Amino acid sequence: MLTLRSYVGGRWIEGGGTPQTLLNPATEAPLASASSDGVDLAAALDHARSRGGPALRATSFAERGALLGTMAKAIQVHRDELLDLAVANGGNTRSDAKFDVEGAVATLSAYAELGASLGTARFLVDGEGVQLGRSPRFHGQHVCVPRTGVAVHINAFNFPAWGFAEKAATALLAGMPVLSKPATSSAMVAHRIMEIVVEAKVLPEGALSLLVGSPRDLPALLGAQDVLAFTGSGDTGARLRALPNVIRESVRINVEADSLNAAVLGPDVEQGGDMYELFLKDVQRDITQKAGQKCTAIRRVIVPAAIAATVRDDLIELLGAVRVGNPARDDVRMGPLATAAQLAEAREGVTRLAAEGKLAFGSAGPIAATGVDAGKGYFISPVLVEFEPGAAASAVHDREVFGPVASLLPYSGDAAEAAAIVARGNGGLVSSLYSDDAGWLEEAVFGIAPHHGRIFLGHPKIELSPGPGTVLPQLVHGGPGRAGGGEELGGARGLAFYMQRVALEGARPVIGKLLGAQPG
């Protein structure tokens, strides 16, 4: 069995104590162990601050971008090996594994290109300068400079490659060193990526560190110049925000948490048309891709009451064709949940939803999964829960079931009513709208926009659309309320979290010389 080690202080360190065992979630076979006991976390942070930070800040955006491009190429060389690890340790089908690993490479490549476009500068000029008084010589200009601390990233179990890459890409390009902490249960992919990067000698010493096992008191060691980016449950995010040092030092923190994402079908969409088929395809994919373990997955399917029964029957047909089982098999379309705890939570969530609605497809009970021994693996069937029009249900708007589970909610067809139903989710990462009616779309978009970080406007004329469940590096990822109140990526916007905006106020010639002091 493989022992995963942390990479901190410029060297690999094996943790002590009683390690956590990483399993294959389809077979429950042990694969690896990981522990952080004995790792000097304070020293790891100090090394990143004192060695990695200065080395990155001495380079230009173009040079940092080139480092990201080299990382992407190194990971791509080992693509097939990483896919195999994602299948074994993550319970991913090969298609799901590609979604994660190739997404990581694409995100690193996108930020490599952004770095090249920013050129030889080492800080960002933020907007136009402004005259501050009657004299044109009294001038002001905002600039953004890298913070001098370390960026700690605590990532979720569902995207060990992409989650690692999307946070690291923005931080490294901004000029901050990174200490990445992957979720232990699925850490084998992130650990292997770190090995690849270290073996290739891509980055300056201290620029990128990896901690496997428990984070222990890592967040409590952060100071005013450090940042913390966390992806996981809202409850954990709240506990992190309440840490005394986070409050005392005003540690900058970004939380990406729960989200009851919705897909809304407009009243103009006809059954059998291209828009209708796209809607069904996107919903079916989001229920089953990565066994529904995506923060962007569609949880609430909101359709006109007049065709709700038709939509239900069509989704049942699509979900019934999905073979669930060992993702190592080519004929399996959906694998298991990641852990026994995730399975227990999903089953409890389905039971709560079914108590207020009606199971239209699937259940919370055990299933006969293809290619595994009876009773083994963390499997659940795809689940569709149906609700009556105007039902006084609460669980569907209060509880995200993190698995292959969606709820079907009828509405009258009125855009304002649809927006009100969506808003009951109390903030989300993304919701999607499917309609060709410009007036309906306008009312729906601006009705749900205050509650979301992104709105996907589905249309069959979009070529090669990845659907609402795919986070693109050019667009922001985050959302208000339940979704955590954070924001990541968004191209150059993603750099702001890792930089300090400062206003320069003084004589225009002096400020001009300062800004001209950086190359470019």
Image: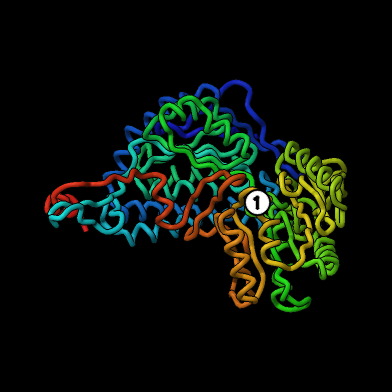
Picture mark count: 1
Q: Which amino acid type is marked by label 1?
A: Lys
Neighbor class of circle 1 (other Cα within 10 Å; few <14, some 14-19, many 20+) is many
Q: Identify residue for label 1.
A: 294
Question: Residue at left 77%, top 67%?
Answer: 304
Determine the image quadrant of residue 52: top left
Between residues 39 and 321, which one lies in front from this camera angle? 321
- Give residue 95's position: percent from left, percent from top: 66, 59
Question: Residue at left 83%, top 64%?
Answer: 312
Between residues 141 and 109, which one lies in front from this camera angle? 141
- Give residue 81's position: percent from left, percent from top: 59, 51
Give the SS element for disc 1. Answer: loop
- Can you say whether 324 is above or below 201 in the image? below
- Give residue 48's position: percent from left, percent from top: 38, 34
> Is residue 85 visible in the rendered structure shown here?
no
Determine the image quadrant of residue 317: bottom right
> Is residue 312 visible in the rendered structure shown here?
yes
- Can you say whether 399 is above or below 360 in the image? above
- Can you say whether 414 is above or below 57 in the image? below
- Can you say whether 194 is above or below 5 in the image? below
- Give residue 248's position: percent from left, percent from top: 43, 26
Quadrant location, the C terminus: bottom left
Q: From the viewer's perspective, tell me whether residue 518 is left or right of residue 242.
A: left
